[in-house]
Image (cartoon, rainbow, N blue to C red):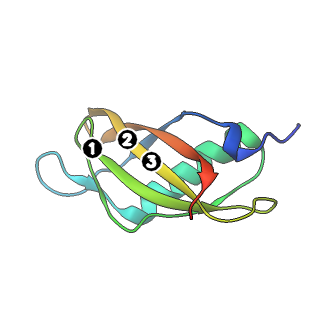
Amino acid sequence: MSRRPLILLTVVPAVLLGLSGCGGGSVKARDVATQAEDALEKQVGARPDITCPNDLEAKVGATTRCSLTAEGLDGTYGVTVKVTKVQGDQASFDVQVDQKPQA
């Protein structure tokens, strides 16, 4: 399987299970990071390291910003995670890696 650079990706869809909290709930920052890593690894064949400082509200349109590092990449890249659908205890979201490293 050939590896594609993470920076060439535009949007990668992912699904997160097990929302917490009342009402719409939220997804813990650690779980968002893990699911984003899983989704990107499936797309490029290499697992990045993603850190998300905040939980993600389980509401369509909600976003959080995370940071990504990976072997072979110079610098840290920003990552936007955006909720696209919430159904029961599942939240679907898109993961978008910035095209340039953070300054």
Inspect the image, locate mark 2, and give the three-letter code of the amino acid beneath it.
Lys
Secondary structure beneath disc 3? Answer: strand
Secondary structure beneath disc 2? Answer: strand
CB-based contact (under 8 Å), mark 2 and mark 3: yes
**Residue at mark 2:** 82
Q: x, y percentage for residue 58?
A: 25, 45
Q: x, y percentage for residue 25?
A: 19, 51
| 64 on left or right of 1 | left
Q: x, y percentage for residue 45?
A: 78, 45
The residue lying at 31 percent from left, 61 percent from top is 55
| 41 on left or right of 54 | right
Q: How far apart are marks 3 and 1 (CA)?
A: 10 Å
**Residue at mark 1:** 62
Nearer to the camera, 97 or 49: 97
The answer to which of marks 3 and 1 sits earlier in the sequence is 1
| Number of marks drawn | 3
Q: x, y percentage for residue 71?
A: 78, 63
The residue lying at 56 percent from left, 61 percent from top is 102
Specify the farthest residue to the left. 23
CB-based contact (under 8 Å), mark 1 and mark 2: yes
In the rendered image of this protein, does residue 70 appear above or below residue 38?
Answer: below
> How many neighbours does mark 1 have within 10 angstroms: few (below 14), some (14-19), or many (20 or more)?
few
**Residue at mark 3:** 80
The residue lying at 29 percent from left, 51 percent from top is 19
| 13 on left or right of 58 | right
The answer to which of marks 1 and 2 sits earlier in the sequence is 1
The residue lying at 44 percent from left, 64 percent from top is 52
